[in-house]
Image (cartoon, rainbow, N blue to C red):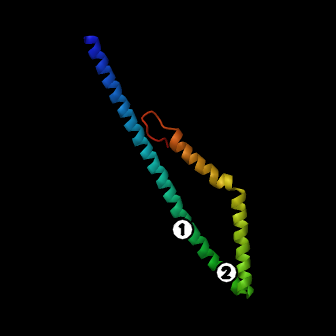
Amino acid sequence: MQEETDYKRLFAEARKHLSLEWNYGKLTAVEKLAVLLSGIAFVAVLTVIGALMVFLVSSLLVGLLAKALGSLLGAQLVVLGLLGCVMAVVFAMRKTLIVDPIARYVTRLFLTPDDDGQQQS
């Protein structure tokens, strides 16, 4: 009789432990998802601000070049060429500038927890 009670208690403890581990896993997943989504939102805001800055600087350059060259179309073509060169460089270095930082961020977020479950810096 005592042995049966011990097995029931052991089974109840194991069930409680599994339930706690499952809840901890869900909490960890939600925490990491929140960090990932906040990183995405931060990059989105930086992208919008960067696009606005490129637009304003391009407009300024077009205005200055239009005065210097005497042609608005010529100034727009020069600025378009400069932006095209910048985009070509970014496209050529996309792995270094875009893919690798994203891969490092996601890898560090999901694959390197320390002993107490917190993210390493």
- Residue at the spot 58% in from the left edge and 46% down from the top edge: 104
Give me the disc on residue 49.
1
Residue 93: x percent and y percent? 70, 56
Q: Count the labels in the image.
A: 2
Which amino acid does the dot numbered 2 rest on? Val
- Residue at the spot 46% in from the left edge and 48% down from the top edge: 33
Q: Residues within 10 Å of mark 2 (few under 14, many from 20)?
A: many
- In the rendered image of this protein, does residue 115 appear above or below residue 26? above
Residue 42: x percent and y percent? 50, 59
From mark 1 to mark 2, how far is it between C-alphas? Answer: 20 Å
Which amino acid does the dot numbered 1 rest on? Ile
- In the rendered image of this protein, does residue 95 appear above or below residue 107? below
Residue 52: x percent and y percent? 56, 72
Q: Quadrant of the N terminus?
A: top left
Q: Residues within 10 Å of mark 1 (few under 14, many from 20)?
A: few
Give me the disc on residue 36.
none
| Disc 1 element | helix
**For marks 1 and 2 on the same chain, the one whose residue lies earlier in the sequence:** 1
- In the rendered image of this protein, does residue 97 appear above or below residue 114? below
Is residue 21 toward the left or the right of residue 75 in the image? left
List the residue tagged with mark 2.
62
- Residue at the spot 62% in from the left edge and 75% down from the top edge: 57
